[in-house]
């Protein structure tokens, strides 16, 4: 099994790497100092080398204290459960292979104790396993030896794969998630980070499917943060330099991800933000139009529905208790009060539909019922919605243009043209 590669730093500057087994020799030669710091994938922060070299107890859980046998132990002429735990602990402490007791020794213990130690002490063994896990992860450095020790404990305690995974899944998911984020956030090339993540994935005792799930969550946070750090706000719109968008997609590919497949929402934000960047920063490009516009260039042309705020009168009827009696055929006699009231209220109503065009100095609406245009110098405010563009002018009602796609693009182009017209 590959040894854990440590990154070493002194006075805040990284100066080299070495495997754990080489650290003692490096210290003896003066190449490393106890006051230096070390880090490896999986650790949240840098730790002092002296802490790594501190002696550890032989077993990461204590030997149980003596306790008298109970009534049932005496009745069945068997040793107490505590005695079984003590004998197994002694076997673990003196075993030639750390944290592993052979099957032959387990059979001998069962015969000596008068019960199956694995069955009777199952809950205690689970607690021991959790204590070992906590001790191994306390320094955020899960070494290959510690991984072997956990595997040996699971074999000694008779845990199957399902039980073992249930005991340590949450802890190692958290360990990997923090380790993955520290790898991604620290300095280094995407290739170096991908290699570190691969090493980290090999070290955690989790199925590859679980590792993939946790890594995907870490990538979602990482790329989401990178997007937020690089995005520029202008006119309440998110703009992203296309070169940054391409780099984010390249980085994702190095990690084996396609942003469009893995994070479709983020991918759509990247696409829209880079498009808006181009619209804001690049020169406006005229487009061809089938309308007769003379020599004035056209920069945007789309089918829209025109809405306006209208003050309308609504007739409402209010009646009290009433009844209806059938007389003959369709003739009915109705009994009850009848009253009509009129109320005036503001409503957004559709007034027309047609083509909206943005020219160099004015916007033109070519509708089914009427044509209209307004100069950009008369525009005082523009508000973009997900499905509409609201234009306020210095006189007349607001114009509400509704369309299914392109409101952000339309808003950007119109704002640029308005700014140009106003100098």
Image (spheres, rainbow, N blue to C red):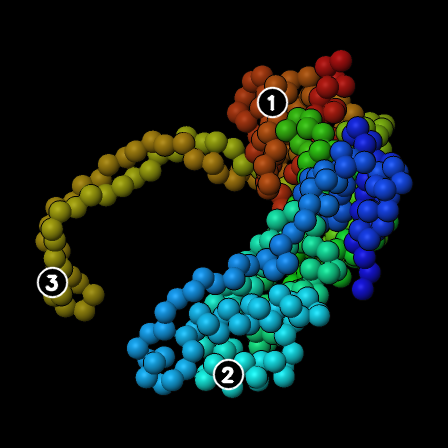
Residue 112 - label: 2
Indicate the position of residue 135 as horizontal and vertical percent values. Answer: 60, 53
Q: Secondary structure at mark 1?
A: strand
Q: Residue furthest top?
A: 423
Contact (Cβ within 8 Å) of mark 2 with mark 1 = no
Position of 253 relative to 164 (above/below): above
Tell me the quadrant of the picture where the C terminus can be found.
top right
Position of 310 relative to 320 (above/below): above
Task: In this rendered view, identify the residue nearer to me: 74 or 161.
Answer: 74
Indicate the position of residue 351 as horizontal and vertical percent values. Answer: 53, 38
Tag nearer the camera, 1 or 3: 1
Q: Secondary structure at mark 2?
A: helix
Where residue 422 sits, quadrant-wise, is: top right
Q: Secondary structure at mark 3?
A: strand
Tag nearer the camera, 2 or 1: 2
Tell me if residue 302 can be seen.
no
Position of 79 relative to 340 (above/below): below
C-alpha distance separating marks 2 and 1: 89 Å
Mark closer to the chain start, 2 or 1: 2
Residue 381 - label: 1
- Taking 86 as reference, is 226 left or right? right
C-alpha distance separating marks 3 and 2: 98 Å
The residue that label 3 is drawn on is 325
Mark closer to the chain start, 3 or 2: 2
Residue 228 - label: none
């Amino acid at each position: 099994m590959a040894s854990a590669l440590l990154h070493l730093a002194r006075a805040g500057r990284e100066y080299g790497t070495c495997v754990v087994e080489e650290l003692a020799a490096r210290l003896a030669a003066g190449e490393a100092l106890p006051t230096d710091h070390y880090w490896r994938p999986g650790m949240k922060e840098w730790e002092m080398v002296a802490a790594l070299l501190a002696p550890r107890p032989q077993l990461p859980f204590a030997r149980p204290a003596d306790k008298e046998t109970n009534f049932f132990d005496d009745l069945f002429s068997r040793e107490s459960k505590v005695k079984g735990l003590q004998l197994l602990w002694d076997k673990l402490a003196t075993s030639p292979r750390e944290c592993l007791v052979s099957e032959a020794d387990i059979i001998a213990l069962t015969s000596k104790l008068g019960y199956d130690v694995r069955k009777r002490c199952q809950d205690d063994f689970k607690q021991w396993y959790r204590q070992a896990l906590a001790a191994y992860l306390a320094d955020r450095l899960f070494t290959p030896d510690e991984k072997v020790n956990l595997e040996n404990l699971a074999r000694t305690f008779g845990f199957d794969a399902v039980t073992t995974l249930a005991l340590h899944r949450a802890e190692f998911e958290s360990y990997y998630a923090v380790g993955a984020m520290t790898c991604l956030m620290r300095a280094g090339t995407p290739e170096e980070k991908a290699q570190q993540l691969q090493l980290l994935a090999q070290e955690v005792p989790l199925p590859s499917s679980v590792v993939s799930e946790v890594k995907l969550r870490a990538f979602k946070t990482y790329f989401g943060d990178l997007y937020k750090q690089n995005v520029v706000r202008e006119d309440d719109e998110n703009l992203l330099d296309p070169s940054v968008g391409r780099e984010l997609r390249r980085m994702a590919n190095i990690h084996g991800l396609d942003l469009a497949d893995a994070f479709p929402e983020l991918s759509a934000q990247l696409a829209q933000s880079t498009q808006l960047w181009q619209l804001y920063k690049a020169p406006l490009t005229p487009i061809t139009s089938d309308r007769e516009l003379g020599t004035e260039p056209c920069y945007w042309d789309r089918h829209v529905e025109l809405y306006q705020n209208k003050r309308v009168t609504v007739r409402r009827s209010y009646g009290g208790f009433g009844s209806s009696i059938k007389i003959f055929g369709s003739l009915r006699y109705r009994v009850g009060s009848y009253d009509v009231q009129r109320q005036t209220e503001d409503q957004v109503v559709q007034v027309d539909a047609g083509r909206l065009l943005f020219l160099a100095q004015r916007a033109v609406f070519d509708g089914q019922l009427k044509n209209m245009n307004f100069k950009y110098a008369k525009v005082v405010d523009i508000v973009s919605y997900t499905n509409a563009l609201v234009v306020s002018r210095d006189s007349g009602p607001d114009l509400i243009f509704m369309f299914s796609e392109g409101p952000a693009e339309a808003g950007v182009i119109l704002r640029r043209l308005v700014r140009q017209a106003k100098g």
